[in-house]
Image (spheres, rainbow, N blue to C red):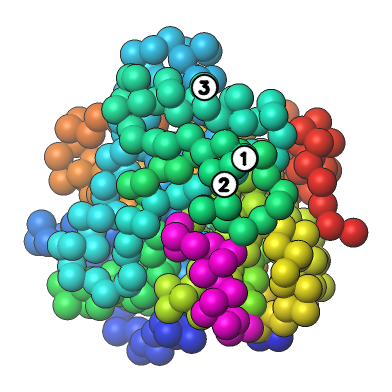
Amino acid sequence: MKTDPYWWEAAPRPDLAAPDLPARVDVAIVGSGYTGLIAALKLAEAGRSVAVFDSDAIGAGASSRNAGFVGRTLKYSFGDLVKSKGLPHAVATYREMQAAFQAVADTVAEYAIDCAFCAHGRLVVAETAGQFEDLKREYELRHRHLGSPFEILDLAALPREIGSPRYRGGVVLPDLASIHPGLYHQGLVKAAIARGVALYPFTRVGALSRESSGFSVVTERGPLLAGHAILATNGYTDGLLPWLQRRLIPFDAWQMATEALPAGLIDRLLPNDRTYIDSYMNIDAIRRSPDGSRILYCGKTGERSDQVTMGKRLAGELRAVFPELKDIGVSHSWTGRCAATFDLLPHLGTHQGIHYAVGYCFAGLPMGSHFGRLLAQRILRPGSVSSVFADRPFKTVPFYRGNNWFVPWMMRYYDLKEGKRHAA
Ligand SMILES: Cc1cc2nc3c(=O)[nH]c(=O)nc-3n(C[C@H](O)[C@H](O)[C@H](O)COP(=O)(O)OP(=O)(O)OC[C@H]3O[C@@H](n4cnc5c(N)ncnc54)[C@H](O)[C@@H]3O)c2cc1C
């Protein structure tokens, strides 16, 4: 069982030599995932000099480890938002989620990134009658107010979408997409280098302090001055800005790839090559690999363990969904870090002059792509950014310093509350 992401087979982390550190840049960016690189690209295209720093290899964070689901959903359903904040706010929020989804499609097209971006659609499955009713209500509401297409599948129709006896019904969202996350990131790296962005792998930024003309940036390669500073560190946010660390709840996400499976078997289990999620807070996510040769499964979010143990446990979960996979072998099992927030919403803002975009709560592929663009705009055209997620109060709780000991317990609490069953 390999413990590096399956995605790194086709998109190994780039082996880059860092250029010499300049005395000054227009913008220093901490974090080289989607958020940091897309901000860097847009700033470089506007003629700004940009340096991107990462304490690890470029893109070694969640951006090259995720499941590659490109959606437009928050942890709050559209119906929840209508109830708690009213229809206009719910519509504005979900329209912005659609803009985030579109940001991925636009980025892929603009930089001609060959990354298996494909709108095969998504199947959201319901395991209980109650979940099925909630699903129907939610997607009918979205269709009525947002025009989002959907198709309801009852028990009799389900086999044409998924070869599992576990579910009671589902909803197909025909326009959602998937991507090869590693190749998407690799395409961003190439585009950034071609536009003169300076990339500094294995260069932790240890301090950022405000000066009269910008920021003094202390890096492992030495100091420099920057006109502006961006933090794009999401689940890997460290003590560089303790204020931000106190507002983020990092958690581990786990994913595995099966060994190559017979084509006929995959066609039976996942006939239409969609992405698949269930309806629990602690979601399980299933998809084919982009070459169609294996099944990828993401689940048990928030658990603390090692990749080999988790690979075996995830395989057990996958068998519980598809009993036909009883002798399944695991070829890759890996992990990565995400960040939740206390209000379960992403945040874009500026603290002590430092711009940040974080807290994607598992939707960072579209949100990171979208917020990367917005971060660049905030610097290029201050005051021009309009986002329902920007500059909102960013909550923390007393005595919290970023220690996420409670995450596994919180996920178990949700499982109990919602009656989610796990494999033995
Ligand atoms: C297993 C898994 C599955 C997921 N599936 C999906 C999915 O299907 N769809 C979806 O939308 N989202 C998914 N996500 C979430 C998504 O991958 C992330 O939200 C997104 O990649 C965050 O991008 P980012 O650029 O903000 O941060 P990251 O890509 O995490 O990059 C942050 C970087 O900051 C660097 N850093 C931190 N501190 C410092 C410092 N002081 N100095 C220098 N560098 C620093 C880190 O080394 C890291 O590389 C998943 C995540 C995981 C782990």
Q: Check mark 1 vs ligand 1: CB closer than 8 Å? yes or no.
A: no
| First along the sequence among labels 3 and 1 | 3
The numbered disc on residue 9 is none
> Could you say whether the residue bearing mark 1 is in a helix, strand or loop?
loop
Whether the residues at callouts 3 and 2 have beta carbons within 8 Å, the answer is no
Magenta stretch holds residue 395? no
Q: Which span is picked out in magenta? A: 259-274
The residues bearing labels 3 and 2 have C-alpha atoms spaced at a distance of 18 Å
Horizontal side, residue 237 vs residue 192: left or right: right
Picture coordinates of residue 23 (x, y %)?
A: 26, 71
As drawn, 403 above or below 265: above
Picture coordinates of residue 155 (x, y %)?
A: 62, 40
Q: Is residue 269 visible?
A: yes
As drawn, 268 above or below 77: below
Q: Which residue is rendered at x = 29% and y = 84% of the image? A: 19
Question: Which quadrant, please, contains the C terminus?
Answer: bottom right
Q: Which residue is rendered at x = 41% and y = 42% of the image? A: 173
Mark 2 lies on residue: 158
Graded by Cα atoms within 10 Å as few (under 14), some (14 to 19) or many (20 or more), the crowding at tag 2 reads many
The numbered disc on residue 137 is 3
Graded by Cα atoms within 10 Å as few (under 14), some (14 to 19) or many (20 or more), the crowding at tag 3 reads few
Graded by Cα atoms within 10 Å as few (under 14), some (14 to 19) or many (20 or more), the crowding at tag 1 reads few
Whether the residues at callouts 1 and 2 have beta carbons within 8 Å, the answer is yes
As drawn, 384 above or below 324: above
